[in-house]
Amino acid sequence: MNRIQGPAVFLAQFAGDAAPFNTLPGIARWAAGLGYVGVQIPTWDQRLFDLARAAESQTYCDEVKGQLKECGVVVTELSTHLQGQLVAVHPAYDLPMDGFAPEAVRGKPVERTAWAIEQLKLAARASQRLGLNAHATFSGALAWPYLYPWPQRPAGLVEAAFDELARRWRPILDVFDGCGVDVCYEVHPGEDLCDGASYEMFLDRVNQHPRANLLYDPSHFVLQQLDYLEYIDLYHSRIKAFHVKDAEFRPTGRQGVYGGFQAWKDRAGRFRSLGDGQVDFRAIFSKL
């Protein structure tokens, strides 16, 4: 427990066009005013951060750290959740996923994938320049439409999807390894890495790569009805980042884990404000 630092806040859902949320110093001062001591920075939002510049310029990275220090916070990790999602996209999701990409590659799946992979490599170098050792991202998804085995999946389909996922990620992981930074996959519904079993399938295919690690977020496991405490027992050596988020699961006669296509607030499983959900954080912190 004496190694835990924080709290920090992920800035992605708060960034906006109005002050103080439209610049890094502004949103950092806002976070510090709420008692946060760290910020996780979304790399796709150029109002806050220039990823390409950070990958190439130590001066820029030093300026970012200096600005944050003046505001009373530090950067904890960079995030490429949206770019990581675009490393692997099933065609069924092309249209909604295009919204995560720049206009130049929308409607062009091959070019979009290449752009996303390059973004991850930039993030590795930027993280190194900022002195960070962990990076938050998503895995993307090629097999997600086939999650439930009905109709029966053709033999080998899931294996082929994970083979391809690993093929795309292995060079990225190698770049992160060269930069001394861990890739921390947020295991999450909608990603091919959605639970422990799928993570193990991926890990086998990247030959237990030392940089293929985990961002632990128990809220997603409550929604899946996965044992989030045993998960720590199984994967503690791979957990390199932690999102402290709460959730609840209250099934009814009308819906359960799948949520019946309802909006977030109407689902049996939904996110809650910290402390208002069902996550046993006392037990989590004890295990960590």
Image (cartoon, grey):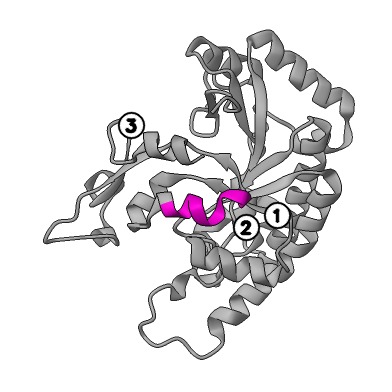
Q: Are marks 2 and 1 in contact (CB under 8 Å)?
A: yes
| Residue 228 % position (x, y) | 41, 51
| Residue 247 % position (x, y) | 33, 42
Q: Residue 243 magenta-drawn?
A: no
Comparing labels 3 and 1, the label whose residue is closer to the camera:
3
**Secondary structure state at the residue bearing disc 2:** helix
Q: Are marks 3 and 1 in contact (CB under 8 Å)?
A: no
**Secondary structure state at the residue bearing disc 1:** helix
Q: Residue furthest bottom?
A: 155
Residue visible at 55% across and 70% down? 90
Q: Looking at the image, is mark 2 or mark 1 earlier in the sequence?
A: 2
Residue 67 circle label: none
Q: Is residue 55 above or below residue 174?
A: above
Q: Tell me which secondary structure the magenta stretch mostly adopts.
A: helix
Tell me the kind of residue under disc 3: Ser
Give the residue at mark 2.
86
Residue 273 circle label: 3
Q: Is residue 159 above or below residue 101?
A: below
Q: Looking at the image, is mark 3 or mark 2 earlier in the sequence?
A: 2
Q: Which residues are magenta?
A: 230-238
Residue 116 circle label: 1
| Residue 274 % position (x, y) | 35, 30
> Which quarter of the picture shows residue 26?
top right
Can residue 19 be seen by looking at this rendering?
A: no
Q: What crowding class fits label 1: few (fewer than 14 Cα within 10 Å), some (14-19), or many (20 or more)?
A: many
Tell me the kind of residue under disc 2: Leu
Across the whole image, how many numbered discs are drawn on residues? 3
Residue visible at 60% across and 17% down? 28
Q: Is residue 31 above or below residue 215?
A: above
Tell me the kind of residue under disc 1: Ala
